[in-house]
Amino acid sequence: MQKLKEANLYNHELIPISGKLVERYNTCLIKLGFTPTKLTNFHIDGIGWSPEIANEKDNVSYLNNGEANLHGILISPLQYKKPVYEPFHTFDREMMQQVFSIHGDKIKDITRDCAICIDFDQYIDAFYEPLDVLKYKDVEISFHLINDLEEKQKEQRRLISKFKTDHNFIDEDLQAELLESANSYGDLRDRDLSLHSLTYTSSSFYTKAFGGVYVLRDFIKPIVVFNDLSWYKEAIKDTIYDVLLFNISQPELIEKLKDHTIVSCDLERIVQTERYERIKKFELISALKETTHSKKDILNDPLLFKSYLNKLDIKRRKHVMSVELYLEKLEVSNQYKIADLIDNDLYFGLHEPHSSLTTNQSDLIWKLLNDVSVKDVLHLYWYDKEAFYKAYNAWDDGFKDWVIETISNKIG
């Protein structure tokens, strides 16, 4: 991962935590019902998730109480508007955007010397059946300050009011109480510590629950897609909900998404795009067994690309160039079908969200398409960083260099 870090492509906006902030973080963990960390230094993102603590606890979702209950921790003003790197649901980032949009200034003030626990209450105590994910709708976002700071503020105001009454200002015991409160919590008199609850309403989304589930409910009919085959088989036994159920590996899924105007695939247009060029290069590298040149050089040099393309056996060569071969044959005769020349895996990887979708819907469908068929490394990085990092570890150095260069050129 060092190359990704150097290119600012790996969790580069994480916030370093040490000293007093570690104590506050542990106080939040305990308040939320979790065990404290033994680490003295770590990093966190905008919602309070830490990769080092996740590794320590061997649990990426260590801020969850079960799959149905997510929490967050705010302990630093620097978390303001920072990314959420490991969302359990695709709407987690949107919820945090809402939190900071409404309470951002107060959060920056409060976290100067206090910490905030966030409870995302979906009114679901626990999941029991895979289609329980359909119960996701409204999420109440509530905030809890550690050390009961709001109560300490009320007490401090009460003491000050008493101090100003009659001749109480000469009461040495009262003076001592005020000094103790001020030394422990600072001057709380004019601090605005009130964070009212918020409500977030979800629409279509992805959740990591049950091995990964897509809930598409903004379209003609609700569609639920399971990444895990065993949970899909369990879900089809449920006769209560009127929804369409699919496993991510079913070929019928893409056809249904096209029927519902969710995805599309115009090969004549796509073949002219940079995305197609990235996919074609990915297919070539996947087909190559041994190379005498760096894979980065092969993919960046048209002459080397052609040289290695011609080193493939005819079957693999046709696969890499199958889209262009199909379009060429189509110009001569319309008797050819896509399935005659293009493998499903490649064809599905060329699909894209329908142009009628909103930005949020489109992002969700890009993520789904990556799960159906991973072909575009740039889109994998954009829409599913967790899957990208796992795939990256299996690539050789030359291909890693090309991937980093490709992504950096698009986001630089």
Image (cartoon, helix red, strand yellow):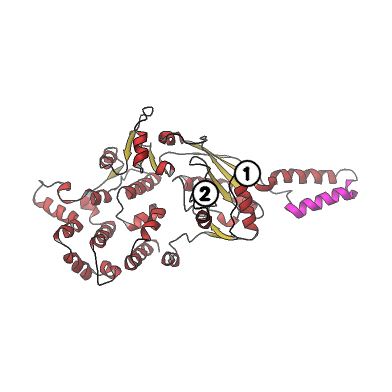
Read off the residue under disc 2.
Answer: 62
Read off the residue under disc 1.
Answer: 144
* Closer mark to the observer between disc 2 and disc 1: 2
Residue at screen point 50% across, 60% down: 13
Picture coordinates of residue 59, whole percent (x, y): 49, 50
**In this rendering, is residue 1 above or below 203?**
below
Q: Secondary structure at mark 2?
A: loop
Between residue 341 and residue 178, name the one nearer to us: 341
- Pointer 2 local density, CA inside 10 Å: few below 14, some 14–19, many at least 20: many
**In this rendering, is residue 11 above or below 139?**
below
Q: Amino acid at mark 1?
A: His
Verify whether residue 365 appears in magenta.
no
Residue 250 left/right relative to 383: left
Task: Specify the quadrant that holds the C terminus.
Answer: bottom left
Residue at screen point 73% across, 52% down: 185
Asked if one can make out residue 298 in the rendered structure from this viewpoint, the answer is yes
Q: Secondary structure at mark 1?
A: strand
Please state the total of marks drawn on the protein image: 2
Q: Amino acid at mark 2?
A: Tyr
Picture coordinates of residue 34, whole percent (x, y): 58, 47
Asked if one can make out residue 222 in the rendered structure from this viewpoint, the answer is no
Which image quarter: residue 135? top left
**In this rendering, is residue 67 above or below 280?**
above
Which image quarter: residue 377? bottom left
Question: Distance from label 2 to label 1 (Cα)?
Answer: 19 Å
Q: Which residues are magenta?
A: 167-192
Verify whether residue 178 appears in magenta.
yes
Picture coordinates of residue 104, whole percent (x, y): 58, 50
- Pointer 1 local density, CA inside 10 Å: few below 14, some 14–19, many at least 20: some
